[in-house]
Amino acid sequence: MAALTNKSLTALALLVALVVGAVPVPAPALELHSIEQAAADYRNSNEQLQEMFRAALLDTSKLAEYASDGTAYVKTGDIPAEWLRDASAQSRPYLFFAKNDPDVRRLLQAITARMAKYLQIDPYANAYTLDYRVWEQKFELDSLAYPTALAWSYWKTTGDASIFTPDFSKMLDAVLATMQREQDHPRNSSYTHKELANDGKGRPVGYTGMIWTGFRPSDDACYYNFLIPSEMFAVVALGDMSEIERDVYHNVVKAREAKALRDEVQRGIQTYGLVLMPKYGYVYAYEVDGLGNAILTDDANIPSLLSAPYIGYTGTNDRYYDNTRRFLLSQDNPSFYQGHRARGIGSYHTPDHWVWPLALIVQGMTATSNTEKQDVLNQLLASDPGDHLLHESFNPDDPRQFTRQDFGWPNALFSEFVMTQFQGISAIPMGDTGDLEFRSE
Protein backbone atom coordinates (compact mmCIF):
# COMPACT_ATOMS: atom_id res chain seq x y z
CA MET A 1 0.00 0.00 0.00
CA ALA A 2 1.37 3.37 -0.98
CA ALA A 3 2.18 5.79 1.80
CA LEU A 4 -0.39 8.53 2.37
CA THR A 5 0.80 12.02 1.51
CA ASN A 6 0.06 15.06 3.65
CA LYS A 7 -2.56 16.10 1.10
CA SER A 8 -4.21 12.66 1.29
CA LEU A 9 -4.21 12.73 5.08
CA THR A 10 -5.83 16.15 5.04
CA ALA A 11 -8.52 14.94 2.64
CA LEU A 12 -9.10 11.83 4.75
CA ALA A 13 -9.42 13.89 7.91
CA LEU A 14 -11.91 16.18 6.22
CA LEU A 15 -13.94 13.20 5.02
CA VAL A 16 -14.08 11.77 8.53
CA ALA A 17 -15.12 15.15 9.91
CA LEU A 18 -17.90 15.40 7.36
CA VAL A 19 -19.17 11.92 8.19
CA VAL A 20 -19.37 12.59 11.92
CA GLY A 21 -20.90 16.01 11.34
CA ALA A 22 -18.05 18.13 12.65
CA VAL A 23 -17.85 20.16 9.43
CA PRO A 24 -20.93 21.28 7.45
CA VAL A 25 -21.02 20.35 3.78
CA PRO A 26 -20.84 23.61 1.79
CA ALA A 27 -23.22 23.99 -1.12
CA PRO A 28 -21.33 24.05 -4.42
CA ALA A 29 -21.13 27.41 -6.17
CA LEU A 30 -23.70 27.85 -8.90
CA GLU A 31 -22.36 27.76 -12.43
CA LEU A 32 -23.18 31.12 -13.96
CA HIS A 33 -21.03 31.57 -17.04
CA SER A 34 -21.46 35.30 -17.54
CA ILE A 35 -20.65 36.03 -13.89
CA GLU A 36 -17.60 33.78 -13.93
CA GLN A 37 -16.42 35.31 -17.20
CA ALA A 38 -16.85 38.87 -15.92
CA ALA A 39 -14.81 38.04 -12.83
CA ALA A 40 -12.07 36.35 -14.85
CA ASP A 41 -11.95 39.18 -17.41
CA TYR A 42 -11.64 41.95 -14.83
CA ARG A 43 -8.12 43.36 -14.89
CA ASN A 44 -6.68 46.16 -12.81
CA SER A 45 -3.14 47.32 -12.19
CA ASN A 46 -4.02 47.27 -8.51
CA GLU A 47 -3.87 43.53 -7.80
CA GLN A 48 -5.65 43.91 -4.48
CA LEU A 49 -8.62 45.61 -6.15
CA GLN A 50 -8.61 42.95 -8.85
CA GLU A 51 -8.80 40.15 -6.29
CA MET A 52 -11.40 41.91 -4.15
CA PHE A 53 -13.69 42.60 -7.12
CA ARG A 54 -13.48 39.04 -8.38
CA ALA A 55 -14.24 37.61 -4.94
CA ALA A 56 -17.08 40.09 -4.41
CA LEU A 57 -18.77 39.39 -7.74
CA LEU A 58 -18.66 35.62 -7.26
CA ASP A 59 -19.76 35.69 -3.63
CA THR A 60 -23.52 35.42 -4.21
CA SER A 61 -23.07 32.38 -6.46
CA LYS A 62 -21.41 30.66 -3.50
CA LEU A 63 -24.20 31.55 -1.07
CA ALA A 64 -27.17 30.79 -3.33
CA GLU A 65 -28.59 27.34 -3.97
CA TYR A 66 -31.62 25.87 -5.66
CA ALA A 67 -34.18 24.23 -3.40
CA SER A 68 -36.18 21.10 -4.18
CA ASP A 69 -39.27 23.17 -5.04
CA GLY A 70 -37.43 25.05 -7.80
CA THR A 71 -36.99 28.24 -5.82
CA ALA A 72 -33.56 29.59 -4.86
CA TYR A 73 -32.33 30.26 -1.34
CA VAL A 74 -29.67 32.89 -0.62
CA LYS A 75 -27.89 32.50 2.70
CA THR A 76 -26.66 35.72 4.29
CA GLY A 77 -23.22 34.23 4.92
CA ASP A 78 -22.08 32.73 8.22
CA ILE A 79 -25.64 32.66 9.63
CA PRO A 80 -27.72 29.74 8.30
CA ALA A 81 -30.73 31.81 7.24
CA GLU A 82 -31.96 34.07 4.45
CA TRP A 83 -32.84 37.68 5.17
CA LEU A 84 -35.29 39.28 2.73
CA ARG A 85 -33.19 42.45 2.72
CA ASP A 86 -29.79 40.81 2.41
CA ALA A 87 -30.85 38.32 -0.26
CA SER A 88 -32.37 41.08 -2.38
CA ALA A 89 -29.19 43.14 -2.12
CA GLN A 90 -26.96 40.12 -2.71
CA SER A 91 -28.89 39.35 -5.91
CA ARG A 92 -28.85 42.88 -7.27
CA PRO A 93 -25.43 42.88 -9.04
CA TYR A 94 -26.54 39.90 -11.11
CA LEU A 95 -29.18 42.08 -12.73
CA PHE A 96 -26.34 43.49 -14.85
CA PHE A 97 -26.00 40.07 -16.49
CA ALA A 98 -29.62 38.89 -16.52
CA LYS A 99 -30.66 40.25 -19.90
CA ASN A 100 -28.11 38.21 -21.83
CA ASP A 101 -27.73 35.13 -19.62
CA PRO A 102 -30.74 32.78 -19.22
CA ASP A 103 -29.08 31.02 -16.28
CA VAL A 104 -28.87 34.29 -14.35
CA ARG A 105 -32.49 35.09 -15.25
CA ARG A 106 -33.56 31.67 -13.99
CA LEU A 107 -31.73 32.23 -10.70
CA LEU A 108 -33.29 35.65 -10.12
CA GLN A 109 -36.73 34.30 -10.98
CA ALA A 110 -36.23 31.50 -8.46
CA ILE A 111 -34.99 33.89 -5.76
CA THR A 112 -38.03 36.12 -6.20
CA ALA A 113 -40.39 33.14 -6.22
CA ARG A 114 -39.09 32.06 -2.81
CA MET A 115 -39.48 35.56 -1.38
CA ALA A 116 -43.08 35.59 -2.57
CA LYS A 117 -43.71 32.46 -0.51
CA TYR A 118 -41.94 33.88 2.55
CA LEU A 119 -44.10 36.98 2.69
CA GLN A 120 -47.28 34.94 2.42
CA ILE A 121 -46.17 32.77 5.33
CA ASP A 122 -45.48 35.73 7.62
CA PRO A 123 -45.13 39.33 6.39
CA TYR A 124 -43.86 40.33 9.84
CA ALA A 125 -40.82 38.05 9.65
CA ASN A 126 -37.49 39.26 8.34
CA ALA A 127 -35.50 36.01 7.98
CA TYR A 128 -36.31 32.41 7.07
CA THR A 129 -34.62 29.04 6.73
CA LEU A 130 -34.24 26.79 3.70
CA ASP A 131 -37.28 24.77 4.81
CA TYR A 132 -39.44 27.92 5.12
CA ARG A 133 -39.34 28.22 8.90
CA VAL A 134 -39.32 31.72 10.36
CA TRP A 135 -35.82 32.44 11.67
CA GLU A 136 -36.68 35.85 13.14
CA GLN A 137 -39.96 37.73 13.40
CA LYS A 138 -38.57 41.23 13.63
CA PHE A 139 -40.91 43.46 11.68
CA GLU A 140 -38.69 45.58 9.43
CA LEU A 141 -40.49 47.74 6.91
CA ASP A 142 -37.60 47.49 4.46
CA SER A 143 -38.09 43.70 4.31
CA LEU A 144 -41.41 44.34 2.57
CA ALA A 145 -39.88 46.88 0.20
CA TYR A 146 -36.79 44.98 -0.94
CA PRO A 147 -38.43 42.02 -2.80
CA THR A 148 -40.85 44.38 -4.54
CA ALA A 149 -38.04 46.66 -5.70
CA LEU A 150 -35.88 43.71 -6.79
CA ALA A 151 -38.68 42.32 -8.97
CA TRP A 152 -39.37 45.75 -10.48
CA SER A 153 -35.67 46.23 -11.28
CA TYR A 154 -35.52 42.76 -12.86
CA TRP A 155 -38.52 43.59 -15.03
CA LYS A 156 -37.11 46.93 -16.15
CA THR A 157 -33.67 45.45 -16.83
CA THR A 158 -34.74 42.35 -18.77
CA GLY A 159 -38.19 43.21 -20.10
CA ASP A 160 -39.29 39.84 -18.71
CA ALA A 161 -42.65 40.06 -16.91
CA SER A 162 -42.91 36.29 -16.31
CA ILE A 163 -41.55 36.94 -12.82
CA PHE A 164 -44.98 38.37 -11.92
CA THR A 165 -46.80 35.12 -11.23
CA PRO A 166 -50.13 34.65 -9.38
CA ASP A 167 -48.03 33.79 -6.33
CA PHE A 168 -46.17 37.09 -6.60
CA SER A 169 -49.51 38.87 -6.82
CA LYS A 170 -50.49 37.30 -3.49
CA MET A 171 -47.20 38.56 -2.05
CA LEU A 172 -48.02 42.10 -3.17
CA ASP A 173 -51.43 41.76 -1.50
CA ALA A 174 -49.75 40.72 1.75
CA VAL A 175 -47.24 43.57 1.54
CA LEU A 176 -49.86 46.22 0.86
CA ALA A 177 -52.25 44.96 3.54
CA THR A 178 -49.46 44.90 6.14
CA MET A 179 -48.29 48.41 5.28
CA GLN A 180 -51.86 49.73 5.44
CA ARG A 181 -52.44 48.06 8.81
CA GLU A 182 -49.24 49.48 10.26
CA GLN A 183 -50.13 53.02 9.27
CA ASP A 184 -52.13 53.08 12.50
CA HIS A 185 -50.20 50.59 14.59
CA PRO A 186 -51.72 51.37 18.01
CA ARG A 187 -55.26 50.90 16.74
CA ASN A 188 -54.99 48.21 14.07
CA SER A 189 -51.98 45.99 14.82
CA SER A 190 -51.50 43.13 17.26
CA TYR A 191 -47.77 42.76 16.50
CA THR A 192 -45.44 42.76 19.50
CA HIS A 193 -41.85 41.73 20.09
CA LYS A 194 -39.99 41.13 23.31
CA GLU A 195 -37.17 43.50 22.29
CA LEU A 196 -39.52 46.49 21.93
CA ALA A 197 -40.38 48.91 24.72
CA ASN A 198 -43.78 49.14 26.40
CA ASP A 199 -44.29 45.39 26.85
CA GLY A 200 -43.31 44.70 23.25
CA LYS A 201 -45.66 47.25 21.70
CA GLY A 202 -43.12 50.01 21.11
CA ARG A 203 -43.13 53.59 22.38
CA PRO A 204 -46.18 55.81 21.83
CA VAL A 205 -46.55 57.32 18.36
CA GLY A 206 -48.82 59.84 16.73
CA TYR A 207 -50.60 59.28 13.42
CA THR A 208 -48.42 60.61 10.60
CA GLY A 209 -49.53 58.74 7.47
CA MET A 210 -46.21 56.89 7.61
CA ILE A 211 -45.83 53.16 8.31
CA TRP A 212 -44.84 51.93 11.77
CA THR A 213 -41.87 49.56 11.94
CA GLY A 214 -40.46 47.67 14.89
CA PHE A 215 -36.87 47.22 13.78
CA ARG A 216 -34.12 48.89 11.81
CA PRO A 217 -32.29 47.27 8.86
CA SER A 218 -29.59 46.41 11.40
CA ASP A 219 -32.13 44.12 13.16
CA ASP A 220 -31.94 46.45 16.18
CA ALA A 221 -35.15 47.70 17.76
CA CYS A 222 -36.29 51.18 16.78
CA TYR A 223 -36.36 53.80 19.51
CA TYR A 224 -38.99 55.86 17.69
CA ASN A 225 -41.00 53.72 15.30
CA PHE A 226 -41.21 55.86 12.18
CA LEU A 227 -37.84 55.06 10.63
CA ILE A 228 -37.35 57.68 7.92
CA PRO A 229 -34.94 55.72 5.64
CA SER A 230 -37.36 52.78 5.59
CA GLU A 231 -40.25 55.15 4.92
CA MET A 232 -38.29 56.49 1.95
CA PHE A 233 -37.78 52.98 0.61
CA ALA A 234 -41.46 52.16 1.17
CA VAL A 235 -42.33 55.16 -1.01
CA VAL A 236 -40.11 53.76 -3.79
CA ALA A 237 -41.48 50.21 -3.46
CA LEU A 238 -45.11 51.37 -3.39
CA GLY A 239 -44.50 53.25 -6.62
CA ASP A 240 -43.04 50.07 -8.09
CA MET A 241 -46.03 48.10 -6.84
CA SER A 242 -48.48 50.55 -8.38
CA GLU A 243 -46.80 50.26 -11.77
CA ILE A 244 -46.69 46.46 -11.61
CA GLU A 245 -50.36 46.24 -10.64
CA ARG A 246 -51.38 48.64 -13.42
CA ASP A 247 -49.18 47.48 -16.30
CA VAL A 248 -48.74 43.77 -15.61
CA TYR A 249 -51.70 42.56 -13.57
CA HIS A 250 -54.02 45.23 -15.04
CA ASN A 251 -55.56 45.79 -11.63
CA VAL A 252 -56.38 49.50 -11.53
CA VAL A 253 -57.91 49.33 -8.05
CA LYS A 254 -54.77 47.89 -6.43
CA ALA A 255 -52.56 50.26 -8.43
CA ARG A 256 -54.49 53.22 -7.04
CA GLU A 257 -54.35 51.82 -3.50
CA ALA A 258 -50.58 51.45 -3.66
CA LYS A 259 -50.14 54.94 -5.10
CA ALA A 260 -52.46 56.49 -2.51
CA LEU A 261 -50.48 54.89 0.31
CA ARG A 262 -47.21 56.01 -1.31
CA ASP A 263 -48.42 59.61 -1.39
CA GLU A 264 -49.57 59.47 2.25
CA VAL A 265 -46.19 58.15 3.38
CA GLN A 266 -44.42 60.80 1.32
CA ARG A 267 -46.46 63.59 2.93
CA GLY A 268 -45.61 62.11 6.32
CA ILE A 269 -41.87 62.14 5.57
CA GLN A 270 -41.96 65.72 4.37
CA THR A 271 -44.13 66.87 7.30
CA TYR A 272 -42.59 64.98 10.22
CA GLY A 273 -39.22 63.74 8.95
CA LEU A 274 -37.40 67.05 8.43
CA VAL A 275 -35.74 68.77 11.38
CA LEU A 276 -34.04 72.17 11.40
CA MET A 277 -30.41 72.14 12.55
CA PRO A 278 -28.84 75.63 12.91
CA LYS A 279 -25.54 74.50 11.37
CA TYR A 280 -26.95 72.51 8.43
CA GLY A 281 -30.47 73.72 7.73
CA TYR A 282 -33.32 71.23 7.35
CA VAL A 283 -32.09 67.63 7.52
CA TYR A 284 -33.87 64.30 7.48
CA ALA A 285 -34.17 62.72 10.92
CA TYR A 286 -33.33 59.05 11.35
CA GLU A 287 -36.37 58.20 13.49
CA VAL A 288 -39.41 60.20 14.64
CA ASP A 289 -42.51 59.40 16.67
CA GLY A 290 -44.98 61.92 15.25
CA LEU A 291 -45.18 63.54 18.67
CA GLY A 292 -42.30 65.97 18.21
CA ASN A 293 -39.40 63.68 19.10
CA ALA A 294 -36.59 62.76 16.68
CA ILE A 295 -33.20 61.07 16.52
CA LEU A 296 -30.55 62.76 14.37
CA THR A 297 -28.04 60.16 13.23
CA ASP A 298 -27.79 57.36 10.67
CA ASP A 299 -26.97 53.66 10.54
CA ALA A 300 -24.75 51.87 8.05
CA ASN A 301 -27.39 49.34 7.07
CA ILE A 302 -29.41 50.11 3.96
CA PRO A 303 -31.87 51.78 3.64
CA SER A 304 -30.06 54.59 5.40
CA LEU A 305 -30.43 58.33 5.11
CA LEU A 306 -27.13 58.42 3.24
CA SER A 307 -28.50 55.91 0.72
CA ALA A 308 -31.58 57.96 -0.26
CA PRO A 309 -30.39 58.55 -3.87
CA TYR A 310 -29.16 54.97 -4.21
CA ILE A 311 -32.56 53.49 -3.27
CA GLY A 312 -34.19 55.85 -5.76
CA TYR A 313 -35.93 58.18 -3.33
CA THR A 314 -34.26 61.46 -4.28
CA GLY A 315 -31.39 62.88 -6.27
CA THR A 316 -27.97 63.82 -4.94
CA ASN A 317 -28.74 67.45 -5.78
CA ASP A 318 -31.77 67.67 -3.47
CA ARG A 319 -31.15 70.46 -0.91
CA TYR A 320 -32.44 68.47 2.07
CA TYR A 321 -30.43 65.42 1.11
CA ASP A 322 -27.34 67.57 0.63
CA ASN A 323 -27.81 69.12 4.08
CA THR A 324 -28.33 65.68 5.58
CA ARG A 325 -25.29 64.21 3.85
CA ARG A 326 -23.02 66.99 5.13
CA PHE A 327 -24.26 66.35 8.66
CA LEU A 328 -23.96 62.56 8.43
CA LEU A 329 -20.36 62.66 7.18
CA SER A 330 -19.24 64.98 9.96
CA GLN A 331 -18.15 64.62 13.55
CA ASP A 332 -21.55 66.07 14.53
CA ASN A 333 -23.14 62.74 13.61
CA PRO A 334 -22.83 60.43 16.63
CA SER A 335 -22.50 57.37 14.37
CA PHE A 336 -19.63 58.80 12.29
CA TYR A 337 -16.26 57.39 13.35
CA GLN A 338 -12.71 58.17 12.28
CA GLY A 339 -9.51 56.17 12.61
CA HIS A 340 -6.07 56.08 11.02
CA ARG A 341 -7.13 53.76 8.17
CA ALA A 342 -10.74 54.75 7.52
CA ARG A 343 -13.55 57.09 8.47
CA GLY A 344 -17.25 56.58 7.99
CA ILE A 345 -20.59 55.64 9.45
CA GLY A 346 -20.96 52.67 11.76
CA SER A 347 -23.88 51.01 13.51
CA TYR A 348 -25.13 50.63 17.04
CA HIS A 349 -25.32 46.93 16.16
CA THR A 350 -21.52 46.49 16.39
CA PRO A 351 -18.64 47.75 18.56
CA ASP A 352 -18.52 51.47 19.19
CA HIS A 353 -16.37 53.47 16.75
CA TRP A 354 -16.14 50.66 14.17
CA VAL A 355 -16.84 51.57 10.53
CA TRP A 356 -19.04 49.57 8.16
CA PRO A 357 -18.00 48.91 4.54
CA LEU A 358 -21.69 49.14 3.58
CA ALA A 359 -21.75 52.79 4.60
CA LEU A 360 -18.45 53.52 2.87
CA ILE A 361 -19.73 52.00 -0.36
CA VAL A 362 -22.95 54.00 -0.17
CA GLN A 363 -20.91 57.15 0.40
CA GLY A 364 -18.97 56.35 -2.77
CA MET A 365 -22.09 55.55 -4.77
CA THR A 366 -23.74 58.83 -3.78
CA ALA A 367 -20.61 60.96 -4.17
CA THR A 368 -20.65 63.61 -6.89
CA SER A 369 -16.87 63.93 -7.30
CA ASN A 370 -14.37 61.38 -8.59
CA THR A 371 -12.01 62.42 -5.81
CA GLU A 372 -14.45 61.31 -3.12
CA LYS A 373 -15.23 58.06 -4.96
CA GLN A 374 -11.52 57.21 -5.21
CA ASP A 375 -10.99 58.13 -1.57
CA VAL A 376 -13.77 55.72 -0.55
CA LEU A 377 -12.30 52.99 -2.74
CA ASN A 378 -8.90 53.45 -1.09
CA GLN A 379 -10.48 53.10 2.35
CA LEU A 380 -12.29 49.93 1.29
CA LEU A 381 -9.03 48.47 0.03
CA ALA A 382 -7.41 49.42 3.32
CA SER A 383 -10.16 47.54 5.18
CA ASP A 384 -9.06 44.21 3.65
CA PRO A 385 -7.68 42.08 6.51
CA GLY A 386 -5.98 39.77 4.02
CA ASP A 387 -8.82 37.56 2.78
CA HIS A 388 -9.84 40.01 0.02
CA LEU A 389 -13.39 40.12 1.39
CA LEU A 390 -15.47 42.88 2.89
CA HIS A 391 -16.92 42.30 6.33
CA GLU A 392 -19.69 43.66 8.50
CA SER A 393 -17.63 46.21 10.43
CA PHE A 394 -13.98 46.83 11.20
CA ASN A 395 -11.76 48.78 13.53
CA PRO A 396 -10.71 51.85 11.49
CA ASP A 397 -7.34 51.83 13.28
CA ASP A 398 -6.75 48.09 12.72
CA PRO A 399 -8.85 46.37 10.00
CA ARG A 400 -7.61 42.98 11.18
CA GLN A 401 -10.26 43.38 13.86
CA PHE A 402 -13.66 42.89 12.24
CA THR A 403 -17.07 41.31 12.66
CA ARG A 404 -18.70 38.64 10.46
CA GLN A 405 -16.20 36.34 8.78
CA ASP A 406 -18.65 35.68 5.95
CA PHE A 407 -21.14 38.42 5.07
CA GLY A 408 -22.49 38.47 1.53
CA TRP A 409 -24.18 41.85 1.40
CA PRO A 410 -21.15 44.22 1.39
CA ASN A 411 -19.35 42.05 -1.15
CA ALA A 412 -22.28 42.22 -3.55
CA LEU A 413 -22.57 45.97 -3.07
CA PHE A 414 -18.84 46.41 -3.62
CA SER A 415 -19.04 44.71 -7.01
CA GLU A 416 -21.92 47.04 -7.92
CA PHE A 417 -19.86 50.05 -6.76
CA VAL A 418 -16.88 49.13 -8.93
CA MET A 419 -19.01 48.41 -11.99
CA THR A 420 -21.08 51.59 -11.85
CA GLN A 421 -18.53 54.09 -10.54
CA PHE A 422 -15.28 52.88 -12.14
CA GLN A 423 -16.25 50.76 -15.16
CA GLY A 424 -18.84 53.14 -16.58
CA ILE A 425 -21.73 50.68 -16.38
CA SER A 426 -25.11 52.37 -15.96
CA ALA A 427 -26.73 51.93 -12.56
CA ILE A 428 -29.87 49.84 -12.27
CA PRO A 429 -32.75 51.89 -10.81
CA MET A 430 -34.95 50.69 -7.96
CA GLY A 431 -37.93 52.84 -8.89
CA ASP A 432 -39.17 56.06 -10.43
CA THR A 433 -40.23 58.77 -7.97
CA GLY A 434 -40.17 61.64 -10.43
CA ASP A 435 -43.78 62.67 -9.70
CA LEU A 436 -43.35 62.94 -5.93
CA GLU A 437 -43.95 66.22 -4.16
CA PHE A 438 -41.15 67.40 -1.89
CA ARG A 439 -41.33 70.10 0.75
CA SER A 440 -40.15 73.52 -0.35
CA GLU A 441 -39.02 76.30 1.99
Image (tube, rainbow, N blue to C red):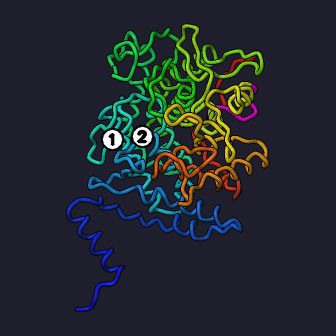
Residue 26 drawn above or below residue 439:
below
At a point 53% along the width and 66% down the height, the residue shown is 34
Q: Position of residue 230 (x, y in %)?
A: 53, 28
Res. 365 visible in picture = no
Residue hosting label 1? 128
Location of residue 247 with respect to 380 vertically, above or below: above
Among all residues in the image, which is located at the extreme left? 20
Picture residue at 52% right of the left edge, 33% below the top: 237
Q: Nearer the viewer, residue 112 or 41?
A: 41
| Disc 2: CA contacts within 10 A as few (<14), some (14-19) or many (>=20) | many
Residue 28 picture quarter: bottom left
Write the residue at 52% across / 55% down.
94
> Residue 357: x percent and y percent?
59, 45
* Residue linked to disc 2: 84
- The residue furthest bottom is 1
Q: Is residue 266 magenta?
A: no
Viewer-proximal residue, 331 or 400? 400
What range of the chain is rendered magenta? 314-319
- Are there few (<14), some (14-19), or many (20+) residues within 10 Å of tag 1? many
